[in-house]
Amino acid sequence: MENSLQNQDIRCKSNPIVFLDIAIDREKVGRIVIELFKDVVPRTAENFRALCTGEKGTGASGKRLHYKGSIFHKVLSQVMIQGGDIINFDGTGGESIYGKEFEDENFKLSHTLAGLLSMVNKGYPDSNSSQFVITLSASIHLDKTNVVFGKVLKGMGVVYEISQVKTAYDVPVQRVQVIDCGELRLEEDWGMEENDGTEDVFTPWPEDWNYSTEIKELDCTYIVDVIKKIKDSGNRYFSQNNYIDAGRKYKKALRYYKWMNKTVYVPDSSNQLMVNTEVALLLNLAAVKLKERNYRETLTLCTEKSSTHGIKRTQLVFSRPKTSSFRIS
């Protein structure tokens, strides 16, 4: 499927496009697609591009000059996420393709938006390496000290998902890892959609879904059918005892459900269908958490109230958790 960007979404058509595939612990959460501002900061953009492809091989430190396998080691909720330490994986190291450090190319661009990429330095000029941040909001306090070099084009939902992980002193408790990365071409398929052999062929986040290639006008009936396909894909994984991917699909279906309620008109005649859809998804996800022996989250899901309909969910009390079960629907 072609990417759906309009011309105005790309700053410059000759700028490189790269991607980061992200997993939180063992769960794949999606792809972040990034435009690098080669037209403004060519050396900084080239550093990030080459670290995505890994084409420079091994650096002076003896470590691969490659983001693959690196982690996001710092999360400041509502501010930024930070990664790119390809040496120590904890924020204490880094290396550029030009050597240990390289110069601040310029400060022409400001940190005015969420989704901007900016270099991390050591607190003094010309100390950039491989570490970077992705902003979650305007961060103009970084202007004139940190170099803006790119922006997220697709997968901002993944960035926000990373920002929601639990932390201890700003360090994620879960492992947030770049499991793959590389370069894309503007005209090629960016690989945002699912491709696992099921009927779920949709992007992990509905905000990235190019639905105009499938239907002229969205309505709740069409989206409910999409949600059912995503849920059925999760059921398939559940039947195979693959609870990580089953849970991933049920969470994805819930994202589409919430997006639908904000995006399209839902007639009164469909209210019960909406309730039934959400209840099924919540209980299926609860079944996954039960299988994973995460009893607290299981109970939370079973007692959750619908923000849309104000209806209290089925509440279950487990006297013998290991023998309790749900019927997947």
Image (tube, helix red, strand yellow):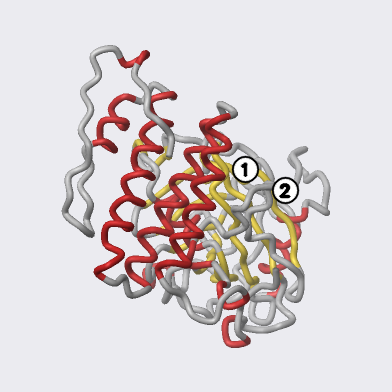
Q: Is residue 153 above or below residue 295?
A: below
Q: Residue at x 20, y 33 (%)?
A: 315
Q: Position of residue 41 (x, y in %)?
A: 65, 75
Whole-number angstrom distance, CA of label 2 to CA of label 1: 8 Å
Q: Position of residue 216 (x, y in %)?
A: 54, 81
Q: For numbered disc 1, what is the local secondary structure?
A: loop
Q: Residue at x 63, y 54 (%)?
A: 194
Q: Name the quadrant of the N terminus.
A: bottom right
Q: Position of residue 33 (x, y in %)?
A: 62, 64
On screen, residue 139 versus residue 108, left or right, reads left
Q: Is residue 322 above or below residue 57?
A: above
Q: For numbered disc 2, what is the local secondary structure?
A: loop
Q: Is residue 131 above or below residue 287?
A: below
Question: Is residue 12 something one can see in this rendering?
Answer: yes
Q: Residue at x 74, y 81 (%)?
A: 14
Q: Name the quadrant of the C terminus.
A: top left
Residue 70, numbered circle = 1
- Residue tagged 2: 66
**Mark 2 in CB contact with mark 1 (< 8 angstroms):** yes
Q: Position of residue 298 (x, y in %)?
A: 31, 30
- Under mark 2, the amino acid is His
- Under mark 1, the amino acid is Ser
Question: Is residue 48 something one can see in this rendering?
Answer: no
Callout 2 environment at 10 Å: few (<14), some (14 to 19), or many (20+)?
Answer: many
Foreground residue among 28 and 11: 28
Foreground residue among 62 and 177: 177
